[in-house]
Amino acid sequence: MGLSLELHQISKLYNGQEILKDCSWVFGEGLTQVIMGLNGSGKSTLLRICALLEAPDRGRVSYLAGGRPLAPDLELKRRLTLLLPAVGVFNTSVYHNVAYGLKIRGVPRREIEERVMGILEVVGLQEKRRQRALDLSTGQAKRLGLARAMVLEPEVILLDEPTASIDQENSEIMEGIIKEMKAERKATIIMVTHDPAQAERLGDQVLLMQGGKLVPS
């Protein structure tokens, strides 16, 4: 059963400035919705709130399964994944970076190996599985970050500028992976980008962050 997300009149202030103001939206289950907007308009803040990593000052964030609201507990948080623009990697191998999230969830060793190797093949890093992750290029590190998110099989994946500051080849690989996820509709995808063409290529719907609110483009 997948998840949908409802935002109801979300507001958030930083240093006395209202970044988000009465922001409401319904992110439908299995859809890919892309958010665009000016720097500082509140896009990244909204993703952190959607990931339950930051609380709004006012308003309500509701995740629903089969139309029923879920408690914002650890179980729910483990069904969500946020991928930030700057991917932090552990000083260990590519394989162990991807396996880490499964290990702390108590997944059996054989299943970890199967899932990690499968995801590394999807992102094109299987041949680098033994390489130290800190030695990857920026584009490869972005793909590693996406692999770490995907291996957890999240029902909601939040992508904050996943192709920012990487070369065209890695950007195309990342887009291809996101397109495959979109086609499978196994997860609700909420993505931030500054690239209008990319937004049109990847999004079922493109939204704009204006005046602290989400509006259709």
Image (cartoon, rainbow, N blue to C red):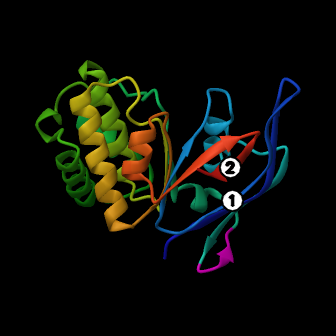
196 sits to left or right of 71: left
Whole-Å distance between the Cαs marked 1 and 2?
A: 7 Å
From this view, report whether residue 24 is shown above or below residue 4: above
Q: What residue is rendered at 61% in x and 56% in y? A: 74
The verdict on residue 192 being magenta is no
Name the amino acid, label 2: Leu
Q: What residue is rendered at 37% in x and 60% in y? A: 182
Q: What residue is rendered at 58% in x and 50% in y? A: 217
Name the amino acid, label 1: Trp
Q: Which residue is mark 1?
A: 25
On the image, the x and y values in percent for residue 188 come to 48, 61
Residue 102 in sight in this render: no
110 sits to left or right of 34: left
Which secondary structure class fits the magenta region best? loop
Identify the magenta region. Answer: 66-70
Q: Which residue is mark 2?
A: 214
